[in-house]
Image (cartoon, rainbow, N blue to C red):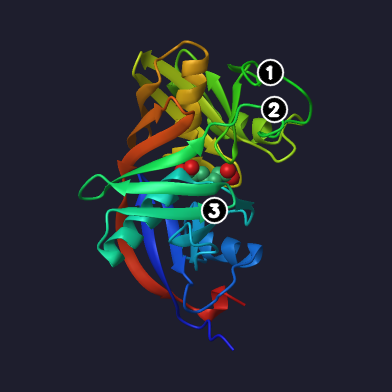
Amino acid sequence: MTDINGLPFLKMHGLGNDFVVLDVRDSGFALTSDRARAIADRRTGIGCDQVVVIEPARSNLSDAWMSLWNADGSETAACGNATRCVAWLLMQAAGIDRVVIETKAGLLDAESRGGRMVAVDMGPARLDWRELPLAKAVDTLNLGIGLGALQNPVGVSMGNPHAVFFVDDVAAIDLAVLGPVLEHHDIFPERANIEAAQVLGPDRIRMRVWERGTGITSACGTGACATLVAAARRGLTGRKADVVLDGGALTIEWLPDDHVLMTGPVALVAEGRLDSSLLS
Ligand SMILES: N[C@@H](CCC[C@H](N)C(=O)O)C(=O)O
Protein backbone atom coordinates (compact mmCIF):
# COMPACT_ATOMS: atom_id res chain seq x y z
CA MET A 1 0.00 0.00 0.00
CA THR A 2 1.28 3.47 -0.83
CA ASP A 3 2.04 5.76 2.10
CA ILE A 4 0.99 9.21 0.92
CA ASN A 5 1.93 10.96 4.15
CA GLY A 6 4.69 13.43 3.41
CA LEU A 7 4.35 13.31 -0.38
CA PRO A 8 7.09 15.62 -1.74
CA PHE A 9 6.15 18.59 -3.93
CA LEU A 10 7.87 21.39 -5.81
CA LYS A 11 6.50 24.91 -6.16
CA MET A 12 7.19 26.28 -9.65
CA HIS A 13 5.88 29.00 -11.93
CA GLY A 14 6.00 30.29 -15.48
CA LEU A 15 5.72 34.09 -15.50
CA GLY A 16 3.78 33.92 -12.21
CA ASN A 17 1.30 31.24 -13.34
CA ASP A 18 2.08 29.00 -10.36
CA PHE A 19 2.04 25.26 -9.82
CA VAL A 20 2.36 22.62 -7.18
CA VAL A 21 4.24 19.85 -9.00
CA LEU A 22 3.92 16.26 -7.73
CA ASP A 23 6.24 13.62 -9.15
CA VAL A 24 4.38 10.37 -8.45
CA ARG A 25 6.41 8.15 -10.75
CA ASP A 26 7.58 6.06 -7.78
CA SER A 27 4.70 6.42 -5.30
CA GLY A 28 1.79 5.77 -7.68
CA PHE A 29 -0.18 8.44 -5.80
CA ALA A 30 -3.48 9.26 -7.55
CA LEU A 31 -4.76 12.83 -7.51
CA THR A 32 -8.51 13.43 -7.26
CA SER A 33 -10.55 16.61 -7.76
CA ASP A 34 -10.94 17.05 -3.99
CA ARG A 35 -7.22 16.65 -3.38
CA ALA A 36 -6.33 19.09 -6.18
CA ARG A 37 -8.70 21.68 -4.69
CA ALA A 38 -7.25 21.18 -1.19
CA ILE A 39 -3.64 21.53 -2.39
CA ALA A 40 -4.45 24.59 -4.55
CA ASP A 41 -6.26 26.47 -1.78
CA ARG A 42 -4.20 29.59 -1.01
CA ARG A 43 -5.34 29.75 2.63
CA THR A 44 -5.54 26.15 3.79
CA GLY A 45 -3.34 24.38 1.22
CA ILE A 46 -0.07 25.18 -0.55
CA GLY A 47 -1.77 27.50 -3.05
CA CYS A 48 -1.43 27.48 -6.83
CA ASP A 49 -3.25 28.06 -10.10
CA GLN A 50 -2.79 24.44 -11.21
CA VAL A 51 -1.68 21.15 -9.64
CA VAL A 52 0.63 19.27 -12.02
CA VAL A 53 1.30 15.54 -11.73
CA ILE A 54 4.27 13.80 -13.36
CA GLU A 55 3.37 10.14 -13.94
CA PRO A 56 5.24 7.25 -15.61
CA ALA A 57 5.28 7.34 -19.43
CA ARG A 58 2.36 5.44 -20.96
CA SER A 59 4.18 4.72 -24.24
CA ASN A 60 7.74 4.51 -25.49
CA LEU A 61 7.19 7.73 -27.46
CA SER A 62 7.43 9.92 -24.36
CA ASP A 63 9.58 10.46 -21.27
CA ALA A 64 6.65 10.99 -18.88
CA TRP A 65 2.89 11.50 -18.67
CA MET A 66 1.64 14.79 -17.24
CA SER A 67 -1.83 15.36 -15.79
CA LEU A 68 -3.12 18.86 -14.98
CA TRP A 69 -5.74 20.11 -12.53
CA ASN A 70 -7.17 23.58 -12.12
CA ALA A 71 -7.61 25.22 -8.70
CA ASP A 72 -11.36 24.39 -8.76
CA GLY A 73 -10.51 20.67 -9.04
CA SER A 74 -11.36 20.31 -12.76
CA GLU A 75 -8.94 18.39 -14.94
CA THR A 76 -7.57 20.00 -18.11
CA ALA A 77 -5.67 18.51 -21.04
CA ALA A 78 -3.22 21.36 -21.65
CA CYS A 79 -1.13 23.94 -19.81
CA GLY A 80 1.72 25.67 -21.60
CA ASN A 81 3.50 27.15 -18.61
CA ALA A 82 3.37 23.85 -16.68
CA THR A 83 4.72 21.99 -19.71
CA ARG A 84 7.82 24.20 -19.74
CA CYS A 85 8.29 23.67 -15.97
CA VAL A 86 7.98 19.87 -16.16
CA ALA A 87 10.17 19.70 -19.27
CA TRP A 88 12.87 21.70 -17.48
CA LEU A 89 12.70 19.38 -14.43
CA LEU A 90 12.97 16.24 -16.54
CA MET A 91 15.84 17.67 -18.61
CA GLN A 92 17.73 18.80 -15.48
CA ALA A 93 17.31 15.42 -13.80
CA ALA A 94 18.51 13.44 -16.83
CA GLY A 95 21.16 15.92 -18.03
CA ILE A 96 19.57 16.10 -21.48
CA ASP A 97 18.27 19.00 -23.58
CA ARG A 98 15.15 17.50 -25.17
CA VAL A 99 12.16 15.61 -23.74
CA VAL A 100 8.76 14.48 -24.89
CA ILE A 101 5.84 14.81 -22.47
CA GLU A 102 2.49 13.15 -23.08
CA THR A 103 -0.83 14.61 -21.95
CA LYS A 104 -4.49 13.99 -22.79
CA ALA A 105 -3.93 16.52 -25.61
CA GLY A 106 -1.07 14.53 -27.17
CA LEU A 107 2.72 14.47 -27.34
CA LEU A 108 4.60 17.70 -26.59
CA ASP A 109 8.19 18.05 -27.72
CA ALA A 110 10.29 20.35 -25.50
CA GLU A 111 13.84 21.65 -25.86
CA SER A 112 16.15 23.62 -23.59
CA ARG A 113 17.04 27.10 -24.83
CA GLY A 114 19.73 27.42 -22.15
CA GLY A 115 19.44 28.40 -18.49
CA ARG A 116 15.82 28.43 -17.46
CA MET A 117 14.41 29.04 -20.95
CA VAL A 118 12.42 26.25 -22.59
CA ALA A 119 10.74 25.96 -26.00
CA VAL A 120 7.75 23.62 -26.41
CA ASP A 121 6.00 22.50 -29.58
CA MET A 122 2.45 22.82 -28.22
CA GLY A 123 1.02 20.81 -31.13
CA PRO A 124 -1.37 22.05 -33.80
CA ALA A 125 -3.84 24.86 -33.26
CA ARG A 126 -7.27 23.23 -33.64
CA LEU A 127 -9.72 25.48 -35.43
CA ASP A 128 -12.75 23.31 -36.15
CA TRP A 129 -15.79 24.11 -33.94
CA ARG A 130 -16.06 20.44 -32.93
CA GLU A 131 -12.51 20.43 -31.60
CA LEU A 132 -12.92 23.49 -29.36
CA PRO A 133 -15.62 22.27 -28.60
CA LEU A 134 -18.57 24.55 -29.35
CA ALA A 135 -22.23 23.68 -28.76
CA LYS A 136 -23.15 24.31 -32.41
CA ALA A 137 -21.56 24.73 -35.85
CA VAL A 138 -20.01 28.22 -35.93
CA ASP A 139 -17.01 29.57 -37.86
CA THR A 140 -14.36 29.83 -35.14
CA LEU A 141 -12.99 33.02 -36.74
CA ASN A 142 -16.10 34.89 -35.56
CA LEU A 143 -17.92 33.26 -32.66
CA GLY A 144 -20.41 36.13 -32.62
CA ILE A 145 -20.91 36.17 -28.85
CA GLY A 146 -19.98 38.95 -26.44
CA LEU A 147 -20.46 40.85 -23.24
CA GLY A 148 -19.70 44.52 -22.60
CA ALA A 149 -16.45 45.53 -24.28
CA LEU A 150 -15.62 41.90 -25.12
CA GLN A 151 -17.28 41.07 -28.46
CA ASN A 152 -17.00 38.51 -31.27
CA PRO A 153 -13.99 36.39 -30.21
CA VAL A 154 -11.91 33.97 -32.22
CA GLY A 155 -12.14 30.38 -30.97
CA VAL A 156 -8.97 28.29 -30.82
CA SER A 157 -8.22 24.98 -29.16
CA MET A 158 -4.67 24.28 -28.01
CA GLY A 159 -5.89 21.03 -26.51
CA ASN A 160 -8.03 23.26 -24.27
CA PRO A 161 -10.67 25.81 -25.32
CA HIS A 162 -9.88 29.51 -25.74
CA ALA A 163 -11.95 32.52 -26.78
CA VAL A 164 -9.75 35.47 -27.80
CA PHE A 165 -11.39 38.91 -27.76
CA PHE A 166 -9.52 41.78 -29.46
CA VAL A 167 -9.89 45.16 -27.73
CA ASP A 168 -8.46 48.68 -28.05
CA ASP A 169 -7.33 48.94 -24.42
CA VAL A 170 -6.75 45.76 -22.47
CA ALA A 171 -6.22 47.69 -19.21
CA ALA A 172 -9.79 48.97 -19.35
CA ILE A 173 -11.37 45.48 -19.38
CA ASP A 174 -12.95 44.28 -16.14
CA LEU A 175 -11.93 40.64 -16.54
CA ALA A 176 -13.01 39.71 -13.01
CA VAL A 177 -16.59 40.55 -13.98
CA LEU A 178 -16.72 39.56 -17.67
CA GLY A 179 -14.42 36.51 -17.49
CA PRO A 180 -16.56 34.17 -15.37
CA VAL A 181 -19.74 34.92 -17.33
CA LEU A 182 -18.08 34.28 -20.69
CA GLU A 183 -16.27 31.18 -19.35
CA HIS A 184 -19.72 29.67 -18.72
CA HIS A 185 -21.41 30.87 -21.96
CA ASP A 186 -23.77 28.25 -23.44
CA ILE A 187 -21.70 28.07 -26.61
CA PHE A 188 -18.85 26.42 -24.63
CA PRO A 189 -20.07 23.01 -23.38
CA GLU A 190 -16.73 22.46 -21.62
CA ARG A 191 -16.39 26.15 -20.57
CA ALA A 192 -13.50 28.22 -22.00
CA ASN A 193 -10.44 30.24 -21.14
CA ILE A 194 -11.13 33.92 -21.89
CA GLU A 195 -8.42 36.18 -23.34
CA ALA A 196 -8.57 39.97 -23.83
CA ALA A 197 -5.90 40.97 -26.33
CA GLN A 198 -4.62 44.30 -27.65
CA VAL A 199 -2.43 44.27 -30.74
CA LEU A 200 0.57 46.55 -30.16
CA GLY A 201 2.27 45.88 -33.50
CA PRO A 202 2.75 43.16 -36.14
CA ASP A 203 4.90 41.13 -33.73
CA ARG A 204 3.68 42.24 -30.29
CA ILE A 205 0.41 41.61 -28.45
CA ARG A 206 -0.63 42.53 -24.91
CA MET A 207 -2.94 39.92 -23.40
CA ARG A 208 -4.75 39.36 -20.08
CA VAL A 209 -6.47 36.12 -19.21
CA TRP A 210 -9.36 34.70 -17.23
CA GLU A 211 -8.55 31.00 -16.93
CA ARG A 212 -11.22 28.34 -16.91
CA GLY A 213 -11.32 26.72 -13.46
CA THR A 214 -8.87 29.18 -11.91
CA GLY A 215 -9.72 32.84 -12.63
CA ILE A 216 -7.33 35.66 -13.45
CA THR A 217 -3.74 34.43 -13.66
CA SER A 218 -0.59 36.37 -14.45
CA ALA A 219 0.13 34.25 -17.54
CA CYS A 220 -1.34 31.45 -19.64
CA GLY A 221 0.89 29.63 -22.12
CA THR A 222 -1.88 28.00 -24.14
CA GLY A 223 -3.72 31.35 -24.00
CA ALA A 224 -0.69 33.08 -25.50
CA CYS A 225 -0.56 30.45 -28.28
CA ALA A 226 -4.29 30.84 -28.96
CA THR A 227 -3.95 34.64 -29.00
CA LEU A 228 -1.18 34.64 -31.61
CA VAL A 229 -3.11 32.17 -33.79
CA ALA A 230 -6.27 34.28 -33.46
CA ALA A 231 -4.41 37.50 -34.32
CA ALA A 232 -2.72 35.94 -37.36
CA ARG A 233 -6.05 34.49 -38.56
CA ARG A 234 -7.66 37.93 -38.35
CA GLY A 235 -4.69 39.46 -40.24
CA LEU A 236 -3.75 41.61 -37.22
CA THR A 237 -0.20 40.23 -36.85
CA GLY A 238 2.24 37.93 -38.57
CA ARG A 239 2.70 34.32 -37.47
CA LYS A 240 5.34 35.13 -34.84
CA ALA A 241 4.96 37.56 -31.95
CA ASP A 242 5.84 38.30 -28.36
CA VAL A 243 2.71 37.96 -26.26
CA VAL A 244 3.05 40.22 -23.21
CA LEU A 245 1.14 38.94 -20.18
CA ASP A 246 0.82 40.46 -16.70
CA GLY A 247 3.80 38.31 -15.60
CA GLY A 248 6.05 38.87 -18.64
CA ALA A 249 6.42 37.86 -22.29
CA LEU A 250 6.30 34.57 -24.18
CA THR A 251 7.51 34.25 -27.77
CA ILE A 252 4.95 32.40 -29.87
CA GLU A 253 5.32 31.17 -33.46
CA TRP A 254 2.60 29.51 -35.57
CA LEU A 255 4.71 27.23 -37.74
CA PRO A 256 3.90 26.33 -41.37
CA ASP A 257 2.80 22.83 -40.26
CA ASP A 258 0.17 24.51 -37.97
CA HIS A 259 2.03 23.55 -34.80
CA VAL A 260 2.56 26.35 -32.30
CA LEU A 261 5.98 26.90 -30.74
CA MET A 262 6.08 28.60 -27.33
CA THR A 263 9.32 29.84 -25.75
CA GLY A 264 9.63 31.23 -22.23
CA PRO A 265 11.12 30.94 -18.76
CA VAL A 266 10.51 28.61 -15.83
CA ALA A 267 11.12 29.18 -12.12
CA LEU A 268 11.55 26.74 -9.24
CA VAL A 269 10.89 28.50 -5.94
CA ALA A 270 10.40 25.92 -3.17
CA GLU A 271 10.21 22.28 -2.26
CA GLY A 272 8.36 20.64 0.59
CA ARG A 273 6.15 17.79 1.74
CA LEU A 274 2.36 17.68 1.82
CA ASP A 275 0.74 16.83 5.14
CA SER A 276 -1.59 13.84 4.94
CA SER A 277 -4.49 16.07 6.05
CA LEU A 278 -4.40 17.61 2.56
CA LEU A 279 -4.67 14.21 0.94
CA SER A 280 -7.48 12.44 2.76
N1 LIG B 1 -2.19 28.15 -17.22
C1 LIG B 1 -2.29 27.27 -18.30
C2 LIG B 1 -3.63 26.75 -18.70
C3 LIG B 1 -4.26 25.91 -17.57
C4 LIG B 1 -5.53 25.18 -17.96
C5 LIG B 1 -6.70 26.07 -18.22
N2 LIG B 1 -7.12 26.81 -17.07
C6 LIG B 1 -7.86 25.19 -18.74
O1 LIG B 1 -8.71 24.78 -17.95
O2 LIG B 1 -7.87 24.88 -19.92
C7 LIG B 1 -1.33 27.54 -19.44
O3 LIG B 1 -0.22 28.05 -19.15
O4 LIG B 1 -1.60 27.16 -20.56
Which one is earlier in the sequence, the residue at label 3 or at label 2? Answer: 3
- Circles 2 and 1, Cβ within 8 Å, touching? The answer is yes
The residue positioned 69% from the left and 27% from the top of the image is 129
Q: Residue furthest left?
A: 115
Q: Residue furthest bottom?
A: 1
Q: Which residue is mark 3?
A: 103
Q: Amino acid at mark 2?
A: Trp
Res. 203 image quadrant: top left
**The N terminus appears in which quarter of the rendering?**
bottom right
The residue positioned 65% from the left and 21% from the top of the image is 140
- Circles 3 and 2, Cβ within 8 Å, touching? The answer is no
Residues under labels 3 and 2: Cα distance? Answer: 21 Å
- In the rendered image, residue 208, in percent from the top left (x then y), is placed at 46, 30
Q: Is residue 251 above or below residue 12?
A: above
Mark 3: C-beta under 8 Å from nearest atom of ligand 1: no
Q: Nearer the viewer, residue 85 or 216?
A: 85
Q: Nearer the viewer, residue 214 or 152?
A: 152
The residue positioned 63% from the left and 16% from the top of the image is 152
Q: Is residue 1 visible?
A: yes
Q: Which residue is mark 2?
A: 129
230 left or right, relative to 146: left
Q: Which residue is mark 1?
A: 139
Residues under labels 2 and 1: Cα distance? Answer: 7 Å
SS assignment at label 2? loop
Q: Amino acid at mark 3?
A: Thr
- In the rendered image, residue 196, in percent from the top left (x then y), is placed at 51, 25
SS assignment at label 1? loop
- In the rendered image, residue 262, in percent from the top left (x then y), is placed at 38, 37
190 left or right, relative to 278: right
